[in-house]
Image: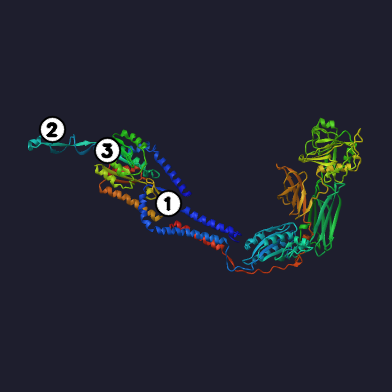
Amino acid sequence: MATASASLTQIKASAAARDKRVADRSELFDERFLKTLEHLHMVSRKVFAGNIRAERRTRKVGSGIEFADHRTYARGDDFRYIDWNLYGRLDKLLLRLFEEEEDLHIYILVDVSDSMAIGSPLPKLHYAMQVGAALTYVGLANLDRVAIIPFADRVIDRLPPSRGKNRIFRVFDFLRNCDIGGKTELAECMKAFVTQNKRRGLAVVISDFYDPDGFEQGINTLRYNKFEPFVLQVYDKREAEPNLHGDLALVDCETGDTREVTVSKSLLEQYTKAHESYCKELEAYCTKYAMPFFRTHTSIPFDELVLKIFRSGGFLR
Amino acid sequence: MSLLGPIPLGIFVYIAIGAALLAVGAYIIKMRRRRFEVPFSQLWRRVLEQKDANSLWKQLKRLISLLLILIILGIVLFAALDPTLGAVDRKARSVVVLFDASASMKATDGSEDGKQTRLDAAKARTKRLIDSMGGGDVAMIMKVDGQATPMSRFSSDGPMLNKIVDGISASDTPADLTRALGAAADALRDRKNPLIVIVSDGAFPEAQLGLVRWDEPKAGPNIEKDLAAVDLSKIDVRYLPVGRRSDNVGIVAFNVRRYIANKAAYEVYIEVQNFGQEPAHRQLALYNGDTAVDIKRIDLAPGQRLKQIYPKLPGSADNKLRASLRPVEGAGGSDAFALDDQAFALLPERKKQKVLLVTDDNLYLEGAILVYDNVDPSKITPAEYDARPQIADGFDVVIFDDHTPAVMPPPPASLLYFHPTGEHSPVKIRGSLANPRITESDEGHPVMRWVTLSDVYMDSTNTFAPDHKKGETAVAYSVRDTVIAAKRDGRRKILAFGFSLPSPGRESATDLPLRVAFPMLLVNTLDWFAGDQTDLLTTYPTGVRERIPLDGVVNATEAEVKGPDGSITKTPVIDGLATFYGARVGYYDVIAKDAKGTPIAQIALAANLASPTESDIAPSTELSLGGKKLDAPEAFSITRSRKLWIYLVLFALALIVMEWITYHRRITV
């Protein structure tokens, strides 16, 4: 009994120390980080040279200047857009449609649940925030409207869409100070997100996708609501290949579920396979529905990951 | 040799139960798991669902692990019971080897060439005896000299017993066989087939050899003697003799004393005996310090004892005396035992005392002091003393004649008062008496030795109220009033007479100075002040416990004894008497210290063998105890029993290693 209580005390102390470490995000976005962002921005400009900045053509008919199509005039339409030439030739009232030009909305959805607090030497949460901040910066610099939404078992907070490089410091402050912790409930969070954000756009989901209810429903919610999901899975190498042995009580850091297990070499191998299989499932799902998917572990520098994303062309088009 | 030695069965059962509970408890604790936090337990659940199919086997493996631990524990506990393979030998014996390590065992006749001592020969014979022991026999080695010292417990471990025998060294004391036999008989009480083997040269006093009984004591005139004798009934006693030669001339007595009348001179007494079968010739030398006092040749017939007295030897600065026997060239000079060829003695220390007389010309006192040759007297008047008390510094004794100074001389000067008065009296004055008579005196006090004061006349005297808490005692009384009082104040001694000596104008104060007792009284007082006791012995035989008076020691409970080899041991002091036991011949210093470590008393002593029994080294091939001749030990019966505990412990270790390997290879987890 004494051993058990000592172990419990130890794990509580360890969790408290970890929470403190994760909560301390003051050093996350320092001067060096900013320089790395600038570098990423320069690189991104070279990679995407020639692309039109902040101009995304949409199917939405609007007040643009580029002709898109005709449609039959209906009562109430603006007379100014009636194609009188066609009326003269065909004797039909047709309305000229133009492609409306609008800014791209990028939503950076960062998973801040308890499972993201795990990781060594860098917690997954910090890594996710750094990647999120980097993508935000590039987006802002490209004059896109970027919003940041941290989530766990609910949408915890929301940084409204903004544009321009100079907003990056607000982003840093937001990421530094936002609440963290809770279970992962992807489906509920995505449902809340689509309800709160009517403007469609790119939804970059940065998470470990460790949702007991599965990741599919959450991603599908984005798809069904015309968002373009961009899936970024972050994991820690030690959770993929844990260095454990002997008799252990495994405690789920989110649910508190405890499972007693004697870890042997064969069991570890099976677990590693199971983890890989889970990741593959996510990847296969994204591939199936043509969603950009990236998997990374915290040992890979975040700027390397961001460049990889740029080169794949999935983030900036 | 056994794993846990002689542990009673009851305690063993408790140990077994406790250990089993501890093992099970430890196993339960072992099953408590270390907690580890994971981000997504569902993945583990997926993996474990497959594993759970064989959980029954897993539980079984756990039980096997617990069973293995209990088996290991059982094996260890069984080993602790000291199991033996083979039939129990009913003839197995319990043996006490009484190994003679007395002085005579130092005789160099252990081998023909004289290179080995008797002790070496005794060791070889004892080891042969131990090596011949059977598997069920157990033996204890007991060293016999002035004391009986068990060197081991009963054991069948031959190499260990041999090692103990090898480590024994001979002392300079006679053997106390009675004490050793008593200790051996006690050790063998209630043991089956008890046996005592005496390995010795047989140099024991006749009185000790007779002080045993082989039967139960019977009522009758000899009952007291029987009860005092060592009970060896039902014990087989055997004798293993060592020794070859008997040629030895030794000093069997050596002592010295000062003359009572002339303490500056002394006389020496020496006894030398030829214990050999041939005439012997020796050179007997007497040394005072390094100075030879006398050297003479002595010729001794076989068995002859020569008594030599050296009278009226003049004193010298060195108080150490040494007598030595040296062989002379030619026949009759061989000697197999060197220890008794030298003897040591000490003259009680004697110091000339510086005495200061504080008096207005007292012819009786001055005359008596001047008669005593061991003082260096000086004289001043009371007025001179009062004017400059520090004048008394450096004197050993200060005598105040009819004068009581306000300032006492500093310690350690001893003080003698005649008729002290007033508040400065060294002992509190109670009152005064007219025409008193000495009715009683403390004859045990050194001052009153050989002195009688019963008919001494005094016209008047002050009486004292001695306080025992301050170290004050009454020396002489007039009925119940103290007339003469003594006091110990640290190292300083004080004597106070309540009456005055005759002086000009008071010639009839007392007739004491006209009596023979007066100079004797003064000499006794000065000797007491100097710590000089005429009857003090400073030379003792080895192997005997003596009580030595330490002059001036009141509160010390312990003294240091510095031996001839420079070793320092502690000895208890009770009522000012220190216990002294000389294990080696030579000079000793007994020093008592106060709580701060400052020496408060010291005495030098000499120890000699002085034992004709030990010096008579002629070996006894036969030995009789209580009229019964002792036989040589018979061969031990050979048993084929084998101790199993070492194999069981090795087996348990192998199981532990196996359990460790299987656990870490995840076979038993």
The foreground one among B642 and A98 is: B642
Q: Secondary structure at mark 2?
A: helix
> Do tag 3 and tag 1 residues touch (Cβ < 8 Å)?
no
**Which of the two discs, 1 and 2, sits closer to the camera?**
1
Residue B619: x and y in percent read: 76, 64
Residue extending furthest toward the front: B219
| Figure check: B65 above or below A101 | below
Packing grade of label 1 (10 A; few <14, some 14-19, many >=20) is many
> Do tag 2 and tag 3 residues touch (Cβ < 8 Å)?
no
Q: Amino acid at mark 3?
A: Asn
Specify whether disc 2 shares its chain with disc 3.
yes
Specify whether disc 3 shares its chain with disc 1.
yes
The foreground one among B463 and B72 is: B463
- State the separation of the CA atoms marked 3 and 1: 45 Å
Residue A248: mark in rendering: 1
Taking B637 as reference, is A208 left or right? left
Work out which quarter of the rendered image holds the C terminus of chain B and state it: bottom left
Query: N-terminal of the two: label 3 or label 1?
Result: 3
The residue wearing badge 3 is A197
> Which subunit holds the residue at mark 3?
A
> Which subunit holds the residue at mark 2?
A
Packing grade of label 2 (10 A; few <14, some 14-19, many >=20) is few
Residue B308: x and y in percent read: 85, 56
- In the rendered view, how is the structure colored? rainbow
Res A302 → quadrant: top left
Taking B112 as reference, is A283 left or right? left
Residue A99: x and y in percent read: 18, 37
Report if residue A313 is visible in the image.
no
| Figure check: A110 above or below B293 | above
Q: Amino acid at mark 1?
A: Leu
Residue A31: x and y in percent read: 37, 36
